[in-house]
Image (cartoon, rainbow, N blue to C red):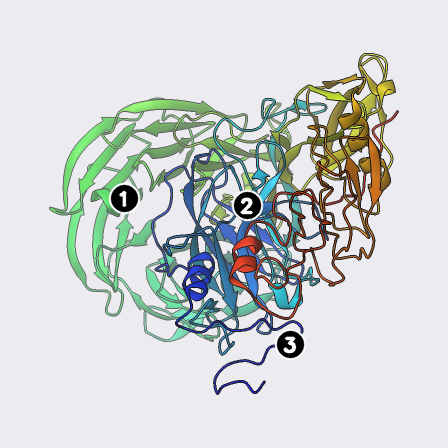
Amino acid sequence: MTPTPGTPPTGPGRPRRPGPRRLSAAAVAALLIAAVPAGAAMSAGATPKTATGPEGQKLSVSATTGLDPAGEKVRVTGEGYGPKSGIYVALCKDNGANRVPSPCLGGADMSGGSKTSQWIVPPGDPYEGDLALPFGPGGTFDVEIEIRSKGDGLDCAEVPCSVVTRADHRASGDRTQDVRIPVTFAGQGPGEPGGEGVDVPAGTVSYKPVADFTSAGKPLDLLLHPESKKLYVGADNLPDTAEVDERGLYVLNPEDGKAESWISQAPGPTGEPRASTAARISGPLPGDGVVYNYPLRGVGSAKAGDKTASGVWLAGSTITDIAPGTAAGTVLVAQGAKLSEIATATGTPTRSVTVPGGSRFAADHARGAVWFSDVAAGKLHLVDLVSFTVADTFDLPGADGMAGFIRTDPATGAVWVGVNRSVLVFDASGKLVKTLIGKDLARDAAFDTESGRAFVVWQDGGDLSDPANDNDGTLTVYDSATFTPAAKDLSLPGNQSQLGAASLAVAPGGATVFVTSPAEGKITRLTRQVSPLVTRAPADRSVKAGEEVALTARAEGTPEPSVRWQVSTDGSQTWRELDGATEPVLTFTAKSAQDGYRYRAEFRNDVGTTRTAPITLTVTEATGGGENGGQNGGAAGGDGGGDSGGDSGDGAGDTSSGPGSTGGDASTGTSGSGDGGSSAGTSGGASSSSGSSGSAGSSAGGAGSTVGGGVEGSSGTETTSGGSLAATGLTVISATLLAAALLGGGLLIHRRARRRTTGLA
């Protein structure tokens, strides 16, 4: 048959494109596509997660825990997918690494309202605009799917489920497109999350030094640019490097610390460039670059690639602090107790106010406030940014020590003031709400609004004649709302205050932190790590001998934890690891000898070890012909094929992904043999009225087979072909199979054969 123009030819791996007038086209389109505006609103119960694929693909899901079992919409976005391969986006059973996610949630909605999956294809693909959506630039997509905990043979309360991407039916054996993000539903997941921490409490957060950057002289101040992601460092000269004057503004690669630019000169009082220390960074410029202060009264700006900063020299006294202004092209500058807003291009003040005392301040533009700290007088002054007047003054208790810093939390408006060995926290109204005590001098603070964390660096005094000093500083992390510790304290050896105050920069999300040590001439890069935290644990199970057991346990952690299943045969007195049991799902066929055995999963990473609570397996003897028939079918299926046979007396054989399964006849207890099976799976079922055996398995390759179910009294040889999520690679798409395909990669409600791990001790 000659295809009509614009219609892709049929053939292996290319299903027929349905005609526009056929009912099946509408039904298929309803199954596979539903136009979703980019950025559509998602569930409020958001626990967003991101995962990376084997070829660098990035998959994100807007909500992953506590989902509504009856159905909930989630936003799924991706980037970095290949330009030559189409993918499906769906909720599927998670069968582990390098194993096809199947079955998948779906259903035949003839009204066109189904949104349980999406088909994404490269631009120009024959199915673009008909059944599938095209990738955006860079292999991106932004879709919405509706998922529920149970339906179409998939029960996420019994098996692990993930929102996944997988190659479409034209490349069903391609596992490079598999990216999986586990999800759970409200009330789901037997066992309490968390688990038993062995060496540290489960979910313990800590920070680990991973690199020291020594390419920026004596680092004084830091800013991680929010757009260019470059690390800007204000630096002075190190006294022990006389051959090189290292003053200036540095631009570093935040990953390896290599200097991409060094702006060593800025205009002096005569306008001529000269070597200048970058003392304090004000804030970022749009796109890239920063505004900063250089001694004594210079305000400069520069970006990566510049040789010399542009700048102005102010009249008056020495600049003691600087921050972004209220309008573009302006900065706030403190010259002692005088606060001015100036134009960065000219240095001309647009307005000024003199406060009762102080020299350091923190600007809160969201609330129109500037907080001035006057440690000498023990006062905290509030300047209204609208009227540019002193609006109020508050006591600063215990301010008889060394002034450290003043910072505002952008999320809450709280004011954090470092004084000597304490941090005083005031709320946005000026009320003292918390005093945090450290063993060292409070030198700087930074906030991450994404995680709600406050980071404080404490610096040792450096005078070893004082018994209170040990030459080591400390990094502490607090919950910025409750002020409770949110991570283990990290010692910073050698970080002392004799040659300058330490400063901080935090990457969004708090996964990376940079800390300066002026005395050592280095910046330390820290990364967050988390000990395993169990998110799903198994519960006690009661089964009959010969039944399949699947125990599921999952945990989160950084680095990603590994899992090993353990068994105890003596009531938890001793435990040993099961050989090869290193996947989240432990699957085996129960035997009578395992009655009373206890099982647990142990998760490990570099931070610690966490175990699930032990569960008990109760195994009873199987009785009755139907059960024997089912057991025989399961034994015959073994590792090579799926289980078949049933214990309900109907003797219907299940399909499988292995090379031929055995159908059990429930009425007689005998087992029948499937012939013609292949790696794609088998089909056929035994009739309960006749006890005849299923036969004629599918010969198609791919990730799964279609269902060949014999009606009562038939031989069970019927086969079908094609399908989108069916992933069969057969020649023709039929509406029936496209509907069935969404039910699970070619397996409607039947179990996929899995490599079994013995549960025996």
**Disc nearest the viewer among 3 and 1:** 3
What's the amino acid at mark 3? Gly
Q: Position of residue 192 (x, y in %)?
A: 58, 22
Location of the C terminus by quadrant is: top right
Residue 691 picture quarter: top right
Q: Position of residue 366 (x, y in %)?
A: 25, 45
Residue 757 in view of the camera: no
Q: Residues within 10 Å of mark 2 (few under 14, many from 20)?
A: some
Q: Find numbered disc 1 in the image and state the secondary structure of the residue it sits on.
A: strand
Horizontally, residue 300 falls left or right of residue 730, namely left
Q: Circle 2 is placed at which residue position?
A: 511
Q: Position of residue 476 (x, y in %)?
A: 53, 33
Mark with earlier residue (1, 2): 1
Mark with earlier residue (3, 2): 3
Mark with earlier residue (3, 1): 3
On screen, 649 above or below 493?
A: above
Residue 528 picture quarter: top right
Looking at the picture, tell me which residue is in the foreground, 337 or 730: 730
Real-space CA distance between mark 3 and mark 2, rounded to the nearest whole angstrom: 50 Å
Q: Residues within 10 Å of mark 3 (few under 14, many from 20)?
A: few
Q: Circle 3 is placed at which residue position?
A: 11
Q: Circle 1 is placed at which residue position?
A: 364
On screen, 607 above or below 248?
A: above
Real-space CA distance between mark 1 and mark 2, rounded to the nearest whole angstrom: 25 Å
Q: Are marks 3 and 2 in contact (CB under 8 Å)?
A: no
Real-space CA distance between mark 3 and mark 1, rounded to the nearest whole angstrom: 65 Å
Location of the N terminus by quadrant is: bottom right
Q: Residue at x 51, y 70 (%)?
A: 138
